[in-house]
Amino acid sequence: MSQIELPKVYNPQDFEDRLYEFWLKNDLFSPRGEGKPFVVAIPPPNVTGVLHMGHGLNNSLQDALVRYWRMKGRPTLWVPGTDHAGIATQQVVERRLQKEGKTRHDLGREKFVELTWKVKEEHHAIISQQLKKIGASLDWKRERFTMDDGLNRAVRHVFVELYNRGLIYKGRYLVNWDPDAQTAISDDEVEHKEVAGFLYHIKYPFADGSGHVQLATTRPETLLGDVAVAVHPSDERYTGLVGKLLTLPIADRPIPLIADPFVDKEFGTGAVKITPAHDPNDFEAGRRHDLPQINILNPDGTLGPNVPDRYKRLTTQQARKKIVQELTDLGLFVEAQPHKHQVGHAQRSGAVVEPYLSEQWFVKMKPLAEKALKALKDDEIRFYPKRYENTYTTWLDGIRDWCISRQLWWGHQIPVWTCQACGQVHVVMDAPETCDKCGSEKLVQDPDVLDTWFSSWLWPFSTLGWPDQTPDLAKYYPTTAVVTAYDIIFFWVARMIMAGLEFTGKAPFRDIYMTPLVRDKQGRKMSKSLGNGIDPLEVVAEYGADALKFTMVYLSSQGQDINLDKDGFKLGSKFANKIWNASRYLLMNIPDEGVLPAGQLVKNDVDLWIEGRLNGAIRTVDEAMAAYRYNDMGHAIYDFFWNDFCDWYVEATKLEFYADDPVRKRQAVSKLVLVLEESLRLMHPFLSFITEEIYQQLPGHGFSLVTAPYPVADPKRDNPQVEVQFGLLKELVRGVRTLRSEFTIPPEKDIAVTVGLAPGFADADFLKRHRDLAALFTGSEGLAFGVMGTKPAGVLTVVGKGYETYVQILDLIDVPKEKDRLKKTIDKTAGYVTSVEKKLANQAFVAGAPAEVVEAERSKLAEAQINLTRLKAYLQELEG
RNA sequence: GGGGAAUUAGCUCAGUUGGUUAGAGCGCUUGCUUGACAUGCAAGAGGUCACAAGUUCGAGUCUUGUAUUUCCCACCA
C-alpha cells in the first residue's frame, strides 16, 4: 500500500555523511546566480586545536544564515579557513618535543617550523572533517590559511605599507613579557586576575646616615633594579628631603629621593621605589626624571643581569624570599601586610606577565581607530545586539599602540632586513639580494615573527585575494556579516574594521552578530581544566548534526549566554524525530497512483488555515533573520511544525485517511505533501540533513533543498477569518478534552456531545461544517447541534463564545464534582469581571486610553458577564 | 575605580516599540501500548515578573534608587 517507506527509526548517522558528500560532489556551496552577494568569512579556528562547542554554536548560526540567503537566491559565499595561531601552535609543538626531552633549540628554527607545518596538517584535517560533520555549507574550493602564500603576501604588503607611512615603528619599551613562551605579547593578551599577596614595608637609609625612608611594595624582588624613590612634591613629610641620596640596600647603590606628582600620598607611606625596567609607572617616571633603566631579569623570568651572583637564576618568588630575609637581617624590613592586587597573566600560557624592557615593533593605532569610530557613527557597520557598540567605542577611544613582534618561530617573519656592513634597514616585500646603500650582500632578516592577529585582521579581504585585484575580491568584498563570540571584539572584530577601512577603504562587513558564549549548566565557562566541555562531534554522534544546529539556533537569544549540558541537545533531537515521523506517516500513505497535481486540489477551511499558519511562520523567520534573532527563528518553525502542522493539521487528515474513500484520501495526502514540501524548505537552514533526506523522497522533488527557493511570505495566504474560526474549533475540542480528563472518562467510553448555538451566532456554519472533525478530536460518536440554553438533563456544560458544549456520559455524571468545577469557573470569571469593571469605572482610563483599547475591554466585559450569568444558572440547577 | 549585563514557574530561559487573564522547553501530576512518533498523545498543577519609590488611564516592559549575581575594562606601588 505504502509507496514510500522511511526507516522506522530516525537515525541521522544513516544519511548525514552521504548527503554532505552529495552536496559537495554537486558543488552546491559555491556562489551562483546574479544579484547582491551574501558573503561571510568564517572566523578561522586555531589550527592547533579541535573544535569545541563555541565553534559548534558559531558555525551552526553561520550555516543557518548562509543557507537561508543561498535559498533566497543571492550569490552566497561562506569562506572556510584556519588560523596559524602563533603562540598556541608553537606551544603545542614544543610540548611534544618536551616529551622527548627536547626543546625547539635542539632542532633549530628551520626544522622546528617544518615540524610545525606537519602538526598543522594533522590538525587541519581534523578541523575540516569536524566542520563537514556538522554540515557547514562552506565553499571548500576557496579555503585559506593565514600562512599560505597569498596571505603571506598580504601580511608583508601591509607591514611595508604601514612602515612607509610611518605607522609602524620600532622601539625599546617596557612590554608585556610572557616568560613561559619567552616572547612579548600585546596588552590585549594580558588577563588580570586578583591575587592575594602582601604589601611589604621596607626602609631605605639615607646615604649620610640621617635616618631612612620607609616605603611599601608588592614586589620586593625588583629592589635590585631600583634607581630612585619617589614622593609627592607637596607631601610635607618629605619637605626638604627631596634630592638627598639614599643607599639602596643589598645592592649598596646610591639612589636619589625624587618628587613626582604621580605618587599617591595616601597609599602606604607615600614613598614609592622606582624600577623603570620592571614597572610601567616607573618606566614613565624614569623617563621624566632621566633615570637609568636597570634590567634584572632573564627572558625566562629568572633574575639575571645586574644582580649579585647569589641572586642569579633565582625565580622571582625565590628572590622575593631572599630579599626579605636579607632586609630582615639588615634591620630594614618592617612588615608584610596581606594585600590583594591584580596581576597580569598571559592569556595563552597562563604565566605571570613581567613588564620587560625590550626592542619591539609597534603599530600606531590612533589614526586607524579614528576611522573605525567614524564607520560606526556613519552606520557603515552595525552590531547585533547593539549594546556591543559601547565595548567597541570604549576600546577604540582608549586605544594604545599595538606591539606586533613576537619572539617566536611560528608565524610571519618580519619583512625587515638589516645590512650587517652599514646598518641600512630594508623594509620590503621580498628579501633583497644586496644592500641598496652599500651594496653588501650581508643582509639579515629580523628574526621575530608577527602577532597572529596581524594576519587575522586582514582575513575578510586577504582570503579573497587581496592585495591583488582578483575577480573574487571585486565581486564578494566587502563581505556581509561576521558571526563571532563577543569576547574577541578587541582582538579581531575591531582590528578587522580598522584594517578594512585602512587598506580597502571600506568596512569589511556590515553586520556584526555577537554570539553568546556556551557555558555549562552551572554557568561556568567550558574549559579543558574543568573538563566540562561538550565535544560537538559527540553531540553529532549521539543526536545528529541537525539536533546540534537546531538546538543552538533555538537557544541563541540576543546577548544571553547559553548554559547547557549534553542532554540539552535532546531538544533538537526530539524535534528532528518529530519531523521524521510526521513525514514517514505521510509518505507511507501516498497511494500507488501517486499524488494529484496542484491544479486538481480542492482546498477546504483546514487547508486554508494551515497555509495561513505556514505563511505566518515564514514571515517570522524573515523578520528574525533580518534582525539576527535566532531564537525567534527556531521558535517559529518549532511551533508551526509541531503545534500547528502535526497536532492539528495532520491529525485532521486522519478523518480523510480513514474514511475508506480513495478519492478523499488522495486529495488529503496530496495537499499534505505540498505543505510538507514547503515546510521542509522553510526548515532547511536550521535542520539541513533531515529536511534534505525527506525532501529527496517526496514525489516530484527538485534536485536539492540547498538550492531550492526559500518560501516567500504572501499576504494573500493570511486568512484571519479562518484563523479565528479554527481557533473556535480548537477551543471547543479542548473544552471537551478537559472534561474527559477531569472526570477521568476513559477514551473507550462513549460520550454524546451536543453543541448549543446562540441565535445568530456567526460561525455556526463553520462548526456545523466540521462536525466530523470535532467528533474525531473529542473522541465522541457524533456531534449534535442544538440551541444554546436548551440542554439535555444530566450533562456537563462548557461555556464558550457564542455556543455551549454539553457532554453526556452514558451513565450518571458525578454531580458534586461538576458543582465544584462550575464553582471554580465562576470564581475565575467573576474575578475577571470585577477587574475589568473597575478598569472601565475609571474615568481616566476611558478618557485617556485609545478608543479601540476601551472598546475591546467593554466587549470582553460583556462577554464575561454573559458567561457568568449562564454559569450561575447551571450551578443553581444542579443545586436545586 | 569605570562600564555592560542579569534578577520572570522547581530548573534553563523567551517576552521587539508600555495595552487580552505573563509564555516555552525540561521536570512534576493524571490518563492513554488511539492504525507516523512513548524521542509520543491528551489534560493539569505551578509565577506578589528581586525590592522600593516614581512617570502613566495602564508597567514584566519606561525613570531613579537599593540588594544580589556576573562579565569586560583600568598602571594605585
Image (tube, coloured by chain):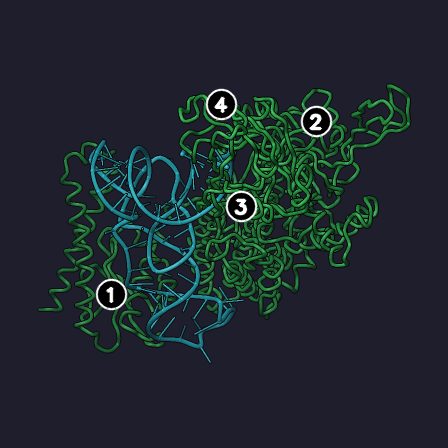
Instruction: Report the chain holding disc 2.
Output: A
**CA–CA distance between discs 1 and 3?**
100 Å
Image coordinates of residue A533 in percent, x first then y, are: 56, 57
Q: Residues within 10 Å of mark 2 (few under 14, many from 20)?
A: some
Query: Which of the two discs, 1 and 3, labels the residue nearer the N terminus?
Result: 3
Task: Give left or right: position of A872 versus A442.
Answer: left
**CA–CA distance between discs 1 and 2?**
89 Å
Query: Which of the two discs, 1 and 4, labels the residue nearer the N terminus?
Result: 4
Task: Give left or right: position of A506 versus B58.
Answer: right
Which of the pair A491/A850 is nearer the observer? A491
From the image, state whether disc 1 or disc 2 is nearer to you. Answer: 2
Which of the pair B48/A647 is nearer the observer? B48
Q: Which chain is green?
A: A
Please state which amino acid type lies under the numbered disc 4.
Val
Task: Give left or right: position of A842 versus A179.
Answer: left
**CA–CA distance between discs 1 and 4?**
101 Å
Image coordinates of residue A138 in percent, x first then y, are: 68, 46
Q: Quadrant of residue A774?
A: bottom left
Instruction: Report the chain holding disc 3.
Output: A
Tag 4 residue: A242
From the image, state whether disc 1 or disc 3 is nearer to you. Answer: 3
